[in-house]
Each structure stands twice: as structure tokens, then as C-alpha cells.
Image (cartoon, rainbow, N blue to C red):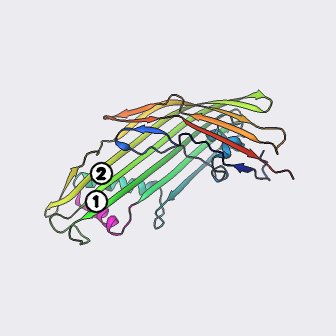
């Protein structure tokens, strides 16, 4: 197994039978499990078979971790021209909401984005972990914002002429988890752990066309699939197993089953069901 001065060789045997698995009415994107910690993420999911750092309990509730706060934030994007974070996702959501409410200035900002050829896909993650040996308390948040924007009109960059507008197909969602884990030594290198997790989700699906129908007057017309806001919370549980051999050159094994209760979040006629996510990780360390 990994020692602090010798990195493990991880085999990415991540049997993700359902990565962020969800059955979703209205096709709302559900941010899935957000891995935390640079080393753990770099191991490609096999970290569930190691889970030996302060962030280990977030990955595998069977982890036995050292004490002390760990907190960080991460941001990423497939849009190389932008540095993305929570504020940019919020700005996108504000513009989508305001244009849907016939705000001309917001419609113009969305049109500017579309004319520049930028259909943003924004992602960001933040976490805080407080490990306490057998147990750990943690928080993590994963947010997604994406927009497909299509200009309508004569090609001018401004909403000047009647009929100018923009077709919007966008989604924004955030999934927050507050979890408490507890693990026990099962003997012969095995540990077992349970996690209780509170889940909170905020999401919105936007499908509408905003068109200039009179001078300085923007009119938004919803398309089929445009939904209200999903704002819901629930409780669920996770179970984890971790095998750490005495000989670090032998294979270590980790198994995690998330969302044992397969909870459903429902609000304003929109439902999101979080299905089981099963992760398996193998790791070893070469002989010196």
C-alpha cells in the first residue's frame, strides 16, 4: 500500500456500473460523485482501494484516516477560453433566468456569447473534510452549467430588428453532500464502513426562444421541456469495504456502493432518482 514518500501504482479497475447513475424526468443533468484530492483523482478512481489520506472517507467509508481539516476547491471546463468557477455558473444562470423573464439586457448578453461561438460547459467542485480516525465528517459540492445558444435574425450582433433573438437549450444543477462515515477493523487486513449522507440538489432546465417582438421588447416563449426549478433534499447511505494487505506489493482492494436507498428528489413535477453507483479499485506498490 501507499506510504507518504512512495506513491502507489494504481490499476484503474473502476468498475463504474453507474457513474452518477440517475433516472431523470425532463433530462436534467445530475452532477455525480465528485472525487476530491489531487492524488486520488490522478489515480483514476482506483483510490477507493487505497483511501489512506485525510480525504479517504469521501471516497470509501471504510477508510481509516488521520485527523485534521482538509479543504479545497477545483474548477474545470471544456471551454478553454474561460476560467470557470462558481461565480461564472451563477452569472450564466442569472442571464438565463432574466432572459426567460423578458429582460432585454440579459438576452443581449446571451446573444453576445452565442455570436462569439461560446456554448459554455462549466464545472466546479468544492469540498471540506474533517477526519477523526474511524469516522469523518465531510462536505462536497459539484456544480454544472451548460448552454447551447443559437442566434436568430439577420446576423447583426445586437437585438435591434424585430425577429432578432436567441434559441436557448441550457441546464444548470448543483449537488451538495454532507456526510458522516464510520469504519471498523474486520480483521486480516479488512475494514468495513458505513456512511450517512444528506443530499441537496438545485437544478433548472431551460428550453425557450427569446425574440424581439417590438422595439426594446423581448418576448420569451417556452419550448416543451422547459421546467421549473428543482429544489429538493433527501437522505441516503453508502457502504464500503477496504482490504489492505500487510505486504504492500500484494493487491489491495476497495469496494464502495453509493446511494443504497436510491433516493428520489421531487419538486414542482420534476423528479430525479439517484441510482446505485458501484466503484471497485485495486492498488499495489512495486517491490523496492
User: Is residue 120 in the magenta section?
Assistant: no
Provide the residue designation for mark 1: 106
Tag 1: Cα neighbours inside 10 Å, few (<14), some, or many (≥20)? many
Residue 125 percent location from the top left of the image: 52, 50
Name the residue: 23% across, 72% down.
156
What residue range appears in magenta? 103-119
The answer to which of 236 and 11 lies nearer the viewer is 11
Name the residue: 19% across, 59% down.
211
Q: Is residue 39 left or right of residue 28?
A: right
Secondary structure under tag 1 reads: helix
The answer to which of 113 and 134 lies nearer the viewer is 113
Q: Is residue 84 left or right of residue 13?
A: left
CB under 8 Å between discs 1 and 2: yes
Provide the residue designation for mark 2: 97
Residue 173 percent location from the top left of the image: 41, 46
Q: Quadrant of residue 116?
A: bottom left
Up the image or down, 86 lies above or below 185; here it is: below
Secondary structure under tag 2 reads: helix
Residue 101 percent location from the top left of the image: 23, 51
Query: Which secondary structure is most common in the magenta stretch?
Result: helix
Q: Alpha carbon of mark 1 to alpha carbon of mark 2: how far? A: 8 Å
Amino acid at each position: 500500500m501507499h506510504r507518504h514518500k512512495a506513491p502507489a501504482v494504481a490499476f484503474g479497475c473502476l468498475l463504474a456500473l453507474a457513474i452518477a447513475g440517475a433516472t431523470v424526468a425532463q433530462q436534467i443533468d445530475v452532477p455525480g460523485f465528485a472525487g476530491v484530492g489531487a492524488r486520488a483523482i490522478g489515480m483514476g478512481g482506483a483510490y477507493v482501494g487505497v483511501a489512506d489520506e485525510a480525504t479517504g472517507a469521501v471516497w470509501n467509508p471504510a477508510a481509516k484516516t488521520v485527523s485534521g481539516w482538509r479543504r479545497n476547491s477545483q474548477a474545470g471546463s471544456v471551454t478553454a477560453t474561460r476560467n470557470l468557477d462558481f461565480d461564472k455558473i451563477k452569472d450564466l444562470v442569472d442571464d438565463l433566468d432574466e432572459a426567460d423573464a423578458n429582460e432585454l439586457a440579459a438576452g443581449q448578453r446571451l446573444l453576445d456569447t452565442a455570436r462569439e461561438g461560446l456554448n459554455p460547459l462549466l464545472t466546479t467542485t468544492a469540498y471540506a473534510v474533517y477526519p477523526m480516525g474511524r469516522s469523518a465528517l465531510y462536505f462536497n459540492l459539484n456544480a454544472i452549467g451548460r448552454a447551447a445558444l443559437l442566434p436568430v435574425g439577420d446576423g447583426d450582433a445586437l437585438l435591434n430588428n424585430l425577429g432578432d433573438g436567441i434559441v436557448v437549450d441550457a441546464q444548470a444543477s448543483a449537488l451538495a453532500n454532507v456526510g458522516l462515515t464510520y469504519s471498523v477493523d474486520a480483521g486480516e487486513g479488512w475494514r468495513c464502513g458505513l456512511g450517512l449522507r444528506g443530499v441537496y440538489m438545485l437544478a433548472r432546465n431551460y428550453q425557450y426562444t427569446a425574440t424581439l417582438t417590438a422595439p426594446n421588447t423581448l418576448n420569451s416563449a417556452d419550448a416543451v421541456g422547459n421546467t421549473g426549478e428543482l429544489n429538493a433534499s433527501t437522505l441516503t447511505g453508502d457502504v464500503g469495504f477496504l482490504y489492505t494487505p500487510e505486504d504492500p506489493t500484494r493487491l489491495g482492494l476497495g469496494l464502495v456502493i453509493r446511494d443504497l436507498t436510491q433516493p428520489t428528489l421531487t419538486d414542482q413535477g420534476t423528479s430525479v432518482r439517484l441510482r446505485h453507483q458501484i466503484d471497485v479499485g485495486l492498488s499495489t506498490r512495486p517491490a523496492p
